[in-house]
Image: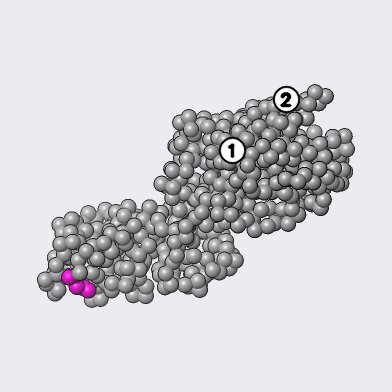
Amino acid sequence: MCIDFPKNRFQDVSKKISYQDIAKGGYLKEIDLFDYDFFNLDKVEAEKMYPGNRLLLEAAVKTVMNAGYHYNDLKNKRVATFVVQQESEYHSFFRRVNKNSSEASYLPMAGTRIANFFKWKGPVTAIDTACSSSLSALYYACQSIKNNDCDAAFVCGEVTDFIFKEAVENHPIYSKNFKCSPYDKDANGTFFGEGVMGVLIKPLDNALKDNDSIYAVVKGGALNRGEMASKNISVPKAESQTEVIELACENASVPLGNIEFIEGQGTGTLLGDTIELEGLSKAKNKHQSYKNCHISSVKGQVGHLGVLSGLVGLFRAIYALQSKQLLGQYNFNYSYSNIFEEKDNKIKIMSKNQAWESKRLLAGVSSFGMTGTNACVILENYHVSKIASKLGQMHLFLIAGKDQLQLKAVKKYIVKYLKGHKNICFGDLSYSLNRLFDNNECRELYAFTTYKELIDQLEEDKTITESFEADFIYLITEIYELEQSIALIERSIYYHEYKTIIEANSSLTVLEKAIIAQYFSFKLLAEVSNNSFRFIGGNIGKYVTKLLSGHLYPKDLVVLDQKKDFNEYKFIKYLVSLPPDKNYVLLTKKEDISNIFTELNDTFTKYKIGLNENPYVDALKIIINHGAHLSLKKHFKNGTFLQDLMLPVFDKKRCWPNTNKD
């Protein structure tokens, strides 16, 4: 979308520039805000950084989280960084401010800062092939993984700049009415656009093994450079574009005739669009093309983002695959190209989206640079298998923040998200949140079965008791209701093991099934809390503690004595003997423990659990309040990551150098 240059940004550039001199464009509204505390930077250092580099740092964190990882999960990994940027007016501005300090505004430092924050061990590479830079970077990132230079790669780029009206008037690529109409008979150029984006790639087998959130699959790609037109070195020839498309399909092991959608270069100029359509047409006509190929370009909506054009096109092609739509061309009415009049033409342009109904969806992304470097990548959609949630099933997730203010902001965002997704799969929501949150200072655990129950809990203004580190002692003197234990483990890694044992032994009584379920529930509690509990058994609860200690195996369980006496005096004696220099939290569901509570001193904090909710959930909430760290992501793996969740991460503040704007 083409807009006037934001006036709030104009205040931060040189007084020598008149606002009237800056042309319209696809501008970012704010580039002066930055959460420097998040990246462990002081304000003075952050203010000296070129804003594009700051945006790329934020994009790296967001990309990692949108891939389904907490930003700490990938630290110290063999991840490579590929960055594309281009010179801008802001580089000149920041070089003057920083007296040419390379660390603050030198272009290749962007990738170094990203890799340094994550402590990534893969190579850092800056790519510049003009307009085809970011798609070339994606291609080289794939090759780097194939060559075992890295296990994964982050490909990113930014364009942060503004353009003068004089440049628009004098350069043939720019539209004089600031409207981009790719492939249309009235096309008269493009308009300048800004942006920042990133994508994380890794081998498909590894992504499946790690249960990653997969947006699409890169089947293959190609780069080439063809002979340029003799009168203008920046004008390409159709033959070289034909060759790069053919080579990309060959490398992807995909027949060109199966490609039904191309996200094109589509600069909106008669010369460039004609050459591109001619190149694609020649490629299709040389092969057995039994499917029509629809072409369109994102530049009609966002303009020309220079070195970032390829990644913008990649994102749009992924959207086409995921939404199963052959995307129409924005601002398209009638084509001027004569290839559409040919009898066997397979190239189609539409003004509106059309349902994409093929069983196998394949798309190409083309990006052509004025350097002569052509890039093409072939993508395939990835079908995500949904795991349905049972009605009435309990779901569990943890959210966190660095302080209460951030935690409240997260809760508010989730409520807003839920109100826009009332048919959401609770299993997917819980799975996604458990993958994204780490144990920050402020943590809250949520257990729910219905939409209303979750909304009510999130909107509740919780009172957080003062926490302190403690050892947790869990007294087990009774067997909980089977349904309570099943509710906890049903979506966990232990449910399959529980079911296998039960199905293999048809002679198990209801009580024995409940004991086994309780054993797996406490085993789960111990592991998600990093073994924070000491379990003490009394009465029939001793069967559970014997299972937990390994002195008894679930398959060998036979309950003979249901009424073992609980030696209260012996238990109190054990508690009193514990080292007095620690704090202890005693949890139990035993109804009559008044004598125990009376005998214990202030070293012990006592809780009766399960009075109002599931006893296991109650226990987890208590230990969180006392500083325990929980890790749910490894134990609740059933679910599909919500790719549109996009949780808020940063607390941005004004961050701009104090200058006289010389």
SS of the residue at dot 1?
helix
Residue at x 31%, y 55% (from the top left corner):
527
Q: Are marks 2 and 1 in contact (CB under 8 Å)?
A: no
Q: Please tell me how crowded label 2 is: few (under 14), some (14-19), or many (20+) other residues with Cα within 10 Å.
A: few
Q: Is residue 185 above or below residue 369?
A: below
User: What is the span of residues highlighted in magenta in the rendered image?
Assistant: 507-512
Residue at x 68%, y 53% (from the top left corner):
327
Asked if residue 387 lies in the magenta stretch, the reply is no
Three-letter residue code for mark 2 = Glu
SS of the residue at dot 2?
loop
On the image, numbered disc 1 is attached to which residue? Answer: 249
Residue 367, by quadrant, is top right
From where the camera sits, is residue 99 visible?
no
Give the Cα separation between the discs numbered 2 and 1.
21 Å
Three-letter residue code for mark 1 = Cys
Specify the label residue 338 is tagged with.
none
Q: Is 88 in front, or is 602?
A: 88
Q: Is 120 in front, or is 555?
A: 555
Name the image quarter holding the C terminus: top right
Residue 169, by quadrant, is top right
Residue furthest to the top in view is: 230
Image location (x, y in percent) of residue 555 = 18, 61
Q: Is 281 in front, or is 483?
A: 281
Q: If you read the primary sequence from the N terminus, does the residue marked by circle 2 or circle 1 appear first?
A: 2
Image location (x, y in percent) of residue 596 = 22, 70
Image side of residue 111 versus residue 568, left or right: right
Residue furthest to the front in view is: 343
Residue 587, by quadrant, is bottom left
On the image, numbered disc 2 is attached to which residue? Answer: 227
Residue at x 50%, y 71% (from the top left corner):
451
Image side of residue 58 versus residue 331, left or right: left
